[in-house]
Image (cartoon, grey):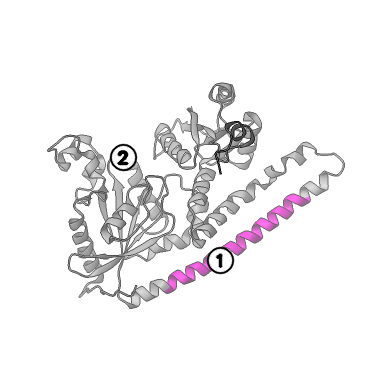
Amino acid sequence: MGDMPKERTQKGMHSTAPVSERAYLVAVEPTRRHTGLDAEASLDELELLAHTAGAEIAGRTVQRLESPHPAHYIGKGKLEDIVAEKDDSNYSLVIFDDELSPSQQRNLENALGVKVLDRTALIIDIFARRAKTREARLQVELAQTQYLLPRLAGQWSHLERLEGAIGTRGPGETQIETDRRLVRTRITKLRRDIDEVRKQRTQHRRRRQRQGMQVVALVGYTNAGKSTLLRTLSGADVFTEDLLFATLDPITRRVRLPSGNETLMTDTVGFIQKLPTQLVASFRATLEEVEEADLLVHLVDITHPDAEEQYSTVEQTLADLGLADKPRLVAFNKVDMLISEEGESVVDALDAIENDLQREHPEAILVSAAKGWNLDELLEQIETKLADIAAPGYTAAVDSTV
């Protein structure tokens, strides 16, 4: 066939490519600063999350308040400023850096005239995009339905505006209750399905235990380089991407230790500050891999400006999961990116950035997962730790059947 006439392709055809939403980002910084990232750094992270979800950034703002406003999260004046920004920035979506209550979300959408999301909904959306396996899809759907349940009344706000009109009063209430019942039923089924996944995982772990295999779990903030480290150490095909939450499903591979023995190493979903409680609960099956591991390797992106806060977030999440006493090693990753001039050593580069985390953890191993630097020392320390855990007389199985 010849080429389609130019006029017809322009007039009769429409692009099917998705149009990027333009997002305006909003955060409140409490005047009494709590621990964690400051508001600007947290918005930087929210911007990365929005990019990961496919949005363009139209603008951002921070308001200092003693506490978020109960009705609109932000103050009335700031809300008016954001409304006034709409013509210039042409935003189609506003994302708030904390979880909004259902009433706050409805009030904000009414005032702004555009879709409003909070950090929780954004992270759940990213997880939904990333979910590939049946387990991950079940876990994400559970998080979505738990998030939706208290917000169902907002789905029927058009009936609230018609309150008192003939034919709307009863059916509105009935529909909301019907929806709630359906969602609760779905949540029950999802939990039952996830329990089946957990039983299957338990069977896999028992098989490992019978074969004498010890398990090392890689933990860390999202995008710390865990998947790259597993790929480099195992030589196996492990998906990596420079995006937040590139890995959702735990991936386990064999890794050969310096003695010739082998261990199983598991890559896990990355943590993040303000991790939605729905995801912590619904990803319990995945987090069991961390619970059942013999040793944790906490990988830290030492080049990140908020490395200390990221380290603390992961450690606090582990503590919340009851894993504070789990044996662990700390490894500072991406040290190759610190060297700014020829001949400069990693130690000199680390000294130059004045990181308190390094002073608190002088025993941390300096590695580059991407370049393969110093991974022999990491493996030696892993083997020593595993031997201590299994003492006396630890011998890891070398079995090619797993």
Sequence-earlier tag: 2 or 1: 1
Specify the label residue 208 is tagged with: none
Q: Which residue is mark 2?
A: 304
**Is 104 a magenta residue?**
no
Residue sitting at 30 percent across and 48 percent down?
300
Image check: 132 left or right of 265?
right
Residue sitting at 45 percent across and 30 percent down?
31
Q: Is residue 360 visible?
A: yes
Q: Secondary structure at mark 1?
A: helix
| Measured Cα–Cα span from mark 2 to mark 1 | 38 Å
Q: Is residue 71 above or below residue 182?
A: above
Name the amino acid type tagged 1: Asp
Q: Which residue is mark 1?
A: 193
Residue sitting at 37 percent across and 59 percent down?
323
Mark 2 touches mark 1? (CB < 8 Å): no
Read off the magenta span: 174-203
Indicate the position of residue 104 as horizontal and vertical percent values: 61, 37
Who is closer to the viewer here, 313 or 59?
A: 59
* Figure disc tally: 2
Indicate the position of residue 135 as horizontal and vertical percent values: 50, 62
Query: What type of secondary structure mainly makes up the magenta span?
Result: helix
- On the rendered image, what quadrant is the C terminus found in? bottom left
Q: Secondary structure at mark 2?
A: loop
Name the amino acid type tagged 2: His
